[in-house]
Image: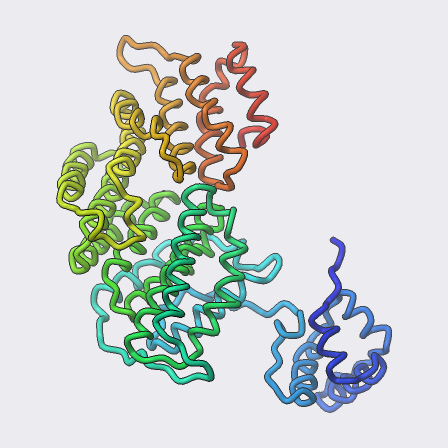
Amino acid sequence: MERQPNQSLQTLLAATGWSHAGLAKRVNQACQVAGYPRAYTATSVANWLRGMVPAAPATQILTALFGQRLRRPITLRTLGFPEEVPLDLGLNWEPSVDAAVDAVVSLWQADTQTGSPLLGTQWIVGAFAAPSREWLLGWFHEDLAHHGDRHIGASDVEVVVAMCDAFSAADHRLGGGYARATLIHYFNEVVRPLLGGSYTHRVGSQILSAAARLCDLGGFMAFDSGYQGLAQRYYIQALRLAQASGDHALGAHILTDMAMQAHYVGDALEAVSLTRAGQRAATAGGSHASVARCLAIEARAHARLGDARRCANVMSCAERAMDRLCPDDEPIWVRFFTHLQLHAEFTYASADLGRTDDVQRFAATVAADASGGMDRRKVLVTAALASSYLTPRGSRRVDVDQACSVLGATAPLLQALTTKRGVEAVNAARRSLQPFAHLSTVQDLESQFQLLIGAPA
């Protein structure tokens, strides 16, 4: 892989006034004092500027040298070097607000690194148990006032909340991968300085709630992009910030997202537990939409466990909760959860139970929705609907032509979407079509998808 020039190091070196040889000499002297003799030269420094990273302890010595010279804190990240990332970063429930904010900032900063090791981490069984317990049992008053070098007011928070809405809309419409890099940059460059500013307890509650939403969005985008270990870390920290802010309804939303991930990775029992914790939080927060959403995901978990009776009972409870809500009274982040979204969740639950008639009944209204803004949902529901036509039931035979026609409707959407889950759903339907690969309708459809997303993995 071709190295990229280290512009950060170049800028700092120019600020010191040191030559390449001068920097090499200083590093060698410090290494000698530390008991690690080195023989760096001007060429070594030129290589660092071209993107090479010196071995320890030179990296830490460089931070000390530049910090002393420029009289300000210098980190590996400031120097343009990758920072070491603790393997447990983001997995712990921090005991104080300050510690939680530090953990959140470290997590977002680690996500800026090219090839961050967190991208390859796996979902950890049981890692949600302590956070959900602490959410339920660990409530206590925390002073959220903070003293920093910049005054932060309600207007600053309003801008962040507006950006949360924009990022959420991009995720729903274009998938988790579309704006993930932009979200990371926004948090690090805009939100992180706000968290370190001066604000009252009231504004602190608001900014922590907004930061919790961004962490939840970061988690959902990572989840949708296939970075399950990273998503799990974002969710845990999002829940911690939501607790600190006292936002029960937001906590319910985050717990439901955690349940969705647990369901996705196959831990349906954990998903049930998380949705029940979410229902308590949603009730405390007065959000009927959040209660309904929790119940809908719980129904999906029961379906995954093969418990049709409990699934049906919980689906009925979700419908009753939806009937009680008034959209204008709901938090803005859960207003997407309408009857259409409820039917989408019921579609997935019915598919897991193998109830093709119910899949087609629930999916019909969702797939026909032309209002826009929920393209990922349309792909997921349409893929489930297409698969239902390939499942024989009673005297009814499979309908390959109908399955191809329905699945083909996802192709225009996939041209803009960046969602691993959506692609997986479409590929699952494509695999169900493989026994009919000799048919021209299947061949035509495959030619179209091969150009868009390649072979079904």
Depth check: 158 or 427 in front? 158
Depth check: 430 or 309 in front? 430
Which residue of the protein is positioned furthest toward the front in this rendering? 155
Residue 188 percent across, percent down from the top left: 51, 67
Q: Left or right? Give the position of 377 relative to 347.
A: right
* Residue appearing at x 30%, y 63% in the figure: 130
* Residue appearing at x 24%, y 44% in the figure: 298
Image quadrant where residue 11 sits: bottom right
Please tell me whether residue 280 is drawn above or below residue 58 in the rendered image.
Answer: above
Q: Left or right? Give the position of 37 relative to 244.
A: right
Residue 183 percent across, percent down from the top left: 49, 57
Q: Left or right? Give the position of 29 relative to 236.
A: right
Depth check: 54 or 290 in front? 290
Image quadrant where residue 405 sits: top left
* Residue appearing at x 30%, y 59% in the figure: 129
Please tell me whether residue 76 is drawn above or below residue 429 in the rendered image.
Answer: below
Please state, as top left, top right, bottom left or bottom right, where the C terminus lies in the image: top right
Depth check: 80 or 206 in front? 206
Number of labels in the image equals 0
Q: Left or right? Give the position of 167 relative to 189.
A: left
Residue 299 percent across, percent down from the top left: 23, 39
Please tell me whether residue 354 is drawn above or below residue 165 in the rendered image.
Answer: above
Residue 255 percent across, percent down from the top left: 29, 55
